[in-house]
Image: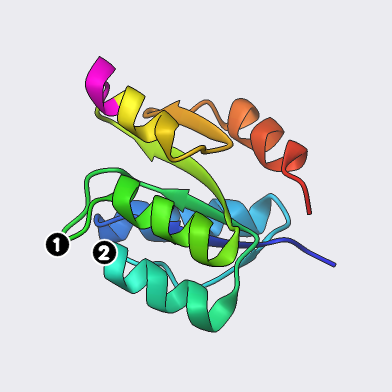
């Protein structure tokens, strides 16, 4: 059975590109979400195994807040993917207990390895 991935990214082109890449990697994908609120609703409906989460999102909730809620509510595995690197932000992100914190531009081999190591 394929693992299901939800991409949470507020840039539509990036979200679609990442979803397409996940399908190439052999994963099932959900329709991408652009906000933390959408991510929670999508996770409620789709129950993804892994969420690729941008940290800076549109809406009231950032990616870290959404990830913490998703992990508590559903036990979903989170991989942060962000273009923003700051020691304070990284510390807050690590408190959400992600599987990984990856910085854009992505090394696709590293991403593939992180996803393959994700528990079912």
Which colour style is shown? rainbow
Q: Position of residue 98 (x, y in %)?
A: 52, 38
Q: Quadrant of residue 110?
A: top right
Dot 1 and dot 2 residues touching (CB under 8 Å):
yes
Q: Residue furthest bottom?
A: 45
Residue at x 27%, y 16% (from the top left corner): 87
Q: Which mark is residue 68?
A: none
User: Disc 2 designates what residue?
Assistant: 35
Report the Cα–Cα distance between label 1 and label 2. 8 Å
Magenta residues span 85-89
**Mark 2 neighbour class, 10 Å CA radius: few under 14, some 14 to 19, many 20 or more:** many
**Mark 1 neighbour class, 10 Å CA radius: few under 14, some 14 to 19, many 20 or more:** few
User: Disc 1 designates what residue?
Assistant: 60
Q: Closest to the observer: 68 or 38?
A: 68
Q: Position of residue 116 (x, y in %)?
A: 75, 40
Residue at x 29%, y 70% (from the top left corner): 37
Earlier sequence position, callout 1 versus callout 2: 2
Q: Is residue 86 magenta?
A: yes
Please determine whether, in this image, residue 90 is positioned above or below residue 80.
Answer: above
- The reply, left or right, for residue 75 in relation to residue 52 is right
């Amino acid at each position: 059975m394929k693992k299901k991935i939800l991409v949470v990214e507020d840039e539509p082109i990036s979200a679609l590109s990442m979803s397409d890449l996940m399908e190439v990697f052999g994963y099932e994908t959900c329709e991408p979400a652009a906000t933390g609120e959408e991510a929670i609703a999508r996770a409620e409906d789709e129950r993804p195994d892994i969420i690729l989460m941008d940290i800076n999102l549109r809406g009231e909730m950032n990616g870290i807040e959404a990830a913490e809620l998703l992990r508590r509510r559903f036990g979903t595995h989170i991989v942060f993917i962000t273009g923003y690197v700051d020691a304070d932000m990284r510390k807050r992100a690590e408190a959400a207990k992600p599987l990984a914190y990856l910085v854009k531009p992505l090394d696709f081999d590293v991403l593939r390895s992180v996803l393959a190591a994700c528990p079912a």
